[in-house]
Amino acid sequence: MATKAEKLASIEEKQKKLAAQKRALEAKDKLEQRKADTRLKVLVGAAVLSEISDDDERRLRSLLDRAIKAPRDREFLAAQGWLNGPAPNSAAKPAAPPTASAATASPAAQGLADKVRAAWAAVMRLPAGADKRKALKTELQVYGFQLSLDRQNSFVVLDKDGRGDTLSRYLGLDNAAINRELAGAV
C-alpha cells in the first residue's frame, strides 16, 4: 500500500502533467486564433486591394503614411511601395498596358480583364521569394476565377463557366515575361 507521501507525490505529478496539458492546449488555441486572424486580414486585404480605384489607393497610401508608426513596419511598407513617395532602392514597375483586345472588349470582358490586372498588380507587390504563382491563384479565386495551364504551357484564366483567355493577353505580356515574374514558383 502507498503511503500518504507517495499518494501526495503521485497527485502532484498528475497535477503537473494536467497543468502542462492545459498550457499546451491554450498555446494551440492561441496559435489557431492568430492564424485565423492572419488569414482574415490576408483575405480582406486581398479583396480590398483588388477593388480599389486609383483615388482609393491614394487615400489608402495616405492612411498608411499617417497610421503606421513603427520603423520596422514603415520600412517594410516603403520597400513594398505602399508609403507615399518612392520606396528606397527600388524602381516602381509600370502597370502593364491594356491589350488591344481589352480596349475593344465587351463590358463584361473588360471587367474580367480589369480584375485579372488588379490581381496581377497585387501579386507583384509581394516580396522576393514569395510563391507568386500560388498567390495569383488565390487572388483570382477571390473573383471566382481559376488559373491553369493550357497545352502550350500558357497560363489561362477561366471564369466559373469555363470562359476566359490567356494571362498574357489580359496583361499584355508574353509568356516568358510572366514566367520570369512568377519564377521560383513554377
Image (tube, rainbow, N blue to C red):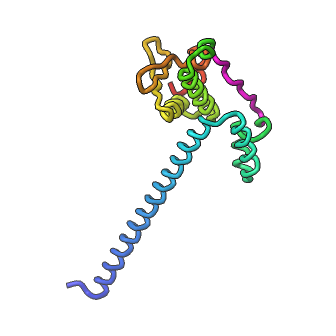
Q: Is residue 175 visible?
A: yes
Report if residue 97 lies within the magenta region: yes
Q: Position of residue 53 (x, y in %)?
A: 67, 34
Residue 82 in the image, given as x and y percentages of width and height: 71, 39
Residue 129 in the image, given as x and y percentages of width and height? 59, 33
Q: Main secondary structure of the magenta part?
A: loop
Viewer can see residue 179: no
Residue at 78% x, 36% y is 88
> Residue 94: x and y, percent?
71, 24
* Vertical placement of residue 31 versus 15, above or below: above
The reply, left or right, for residue 35 in relation to residue 17 is: right
Q: Is residue 112 left or right of residue 11?
A: right
- The single residue placed furthest to the front in the displayed view is 107
Q: Nearer the viewer, residue 10 or 74?
A: 74
Query: In the picture, which quadrant includes the N terminus?
Result: bottom left
Magenta residues, start to end: 88-99
- So how many labels did they put on this image? 0
Asked if residue 106 is positioned above or below residue 132 in the image, the reply reads above
Residue in the picture at 57% in, 28% down: 115
Residue 109 part of the magenta segment: no
The residue sitting at the left extreme is: 1
Residue pictured at 78% horizontal, 35% vertical: 86
* Farthest residue, direction bottom: 4
Image-quadrant location for residue 183:
top right
